Amino acid sequence: MPSVEQGPSTWPACAEWAESRLLVIGGGAVAEAMHLPAVLAVLGTEKVRLAEPDEPRRRTLQEKFGVPAAAADFRDLLADSDAALVLTPPHLHESVTVDCLRAGLHVLCEKPLANTASAGRRMIEEAVRAGKLLASGHNYRFFPNRSWVRDRIKDGEFGPDVFVEITEGSPADWPALTGYMFRKELVPGGVMLNNGVHSLDFLLWCLGDSVEEEYRDDSIGGLESNAVLELRFAEGATARLRISRTRNLANQIRVVGDGQSVTLPAGHMNQVIHADGSIEIKSAVQSRQVNDWPSLGRAQIVDFLAAAATATPPRADGQAGLKVVELIERCYLQKTSRQRLPKAPVPGWMW
Ligand SMILES: NC(=O)c1ccc[n+]([C@@H]2O[C@H](COP(=O)([O-])OP(=O)(O)OC[C@H]3O[C@@H](n4cnc5c(N)ncnc54)[C@H](O)[C@@H]3O)[C@@H](O)[C@H]2O)c1
């Protein structure tokens, strides 16, 4: 039997953020699966507004979640809101976020922060100008097992030469309504930009900025579906990411160093597998239970609203989102400076 670490699961009754009015922009797959249930549980229906241009979709969500205030155009709801969750496809993150900041709202923007680093920088500049919070939707930072292992890396328990190896892959099946992940006119990248952001953010969060990268992927002009990235960090740490959206891979994070090793199942929030094979369950982040997507969504929204209300840093700020997009851009630059393969490799062949 795995050992279980218990933590409190209650929400603060009288917090600074409790009266915040929150505008959810984009009623797609992630809004339905995670954000709407989370924000409604935390704030209640009267403080939540929904902007979704597709009318049948908007009505479906209104009925399912009982949200009274909704509109096709998010700009019609800005005056009645204190903060926004930007859940549109990535190509709209910049324009929507900037409009919200200019209207005086704090913003939590889903990942990737933006399609390009220059767009991400403009978003951060706008937040500074407006004096509002811009947070990034790097929600895997709320996985209790990742949070625990990150603390151990930061405490030096794996030594300065720690090596982190992430292997993640499965055939893409996320039910996005707009299909942005595969539409080259909407996104500049494939598996790295859509899925890789979570692992890349984890590496930068644990190890700091990388100083050297070696990257390759299988695209010959389209969006990559398989990629390998080797990274070196200033203090001597190294990392490797192998990622696929066409193949099942091991789906694990392995942390090795100073004679120790530990493994996290990549898609699991709580499990830690020790070198002797024993399994431990980590269940709390910031003193709150996180063990499924709704509880993770609640932890993220409370962190964001509390940071906005108290002018303290959120768990992942705009800079964190920008660093990941900058890293991905450096990877894509390496790719374009190499000669292209003459034809598409059979998935998996290049590895
Ligand atoms: N953090 C995570 O774990 C996670 C998981 C999935 C998706 N995401 C991110 O969340 C975002 C949304 O992803 P999704 O899969 O829900 O997309 P989706 O295609 O399912 O939904 C996007 C929604 O935005 C709506 N929309 C388009 N333009 C709009 C506008 N101007 N105003 C308001 N709404 C508008 C669309 O009509 C659609 O309903 C993406 O950035 C994605 O990368 C994050």
Image: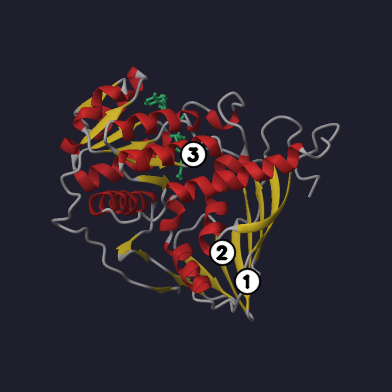
Task: Find residue 206 and report its horizontal and vertical position in percent.
Answer: 53, 63
Disc 1, disc 2: CB below 8 Å? yes
Please tell me how many numbered marks the rendered image carries.
Answer: 3
Relative to 62, 182 lies left or right: right
For the residue marked with disc 3, what is the amino acid? Gly
- Residue most extreme to the top: 55
Front residue of this view, candidates 168 and 85: 85
Task: Find residue 71 and report its horizontal and vertical position in percent.
Answer: 27, 22
Relative to 351, 267 lies left or right: left
Q: Secondary structure at mark 3?
A: helix
Could you tell which of marks 1 and 2 lies nearer the N-terminus? 1
Residue bearing the label numbered 2: 207
**Mark 1 against mark 3, which lies toward the viewer?**
3
Residue bearing the label numbered 3: 120
For the residue marked with disc 1, what is the amino acid? Val
Residue bearing the label numbered 1: 162
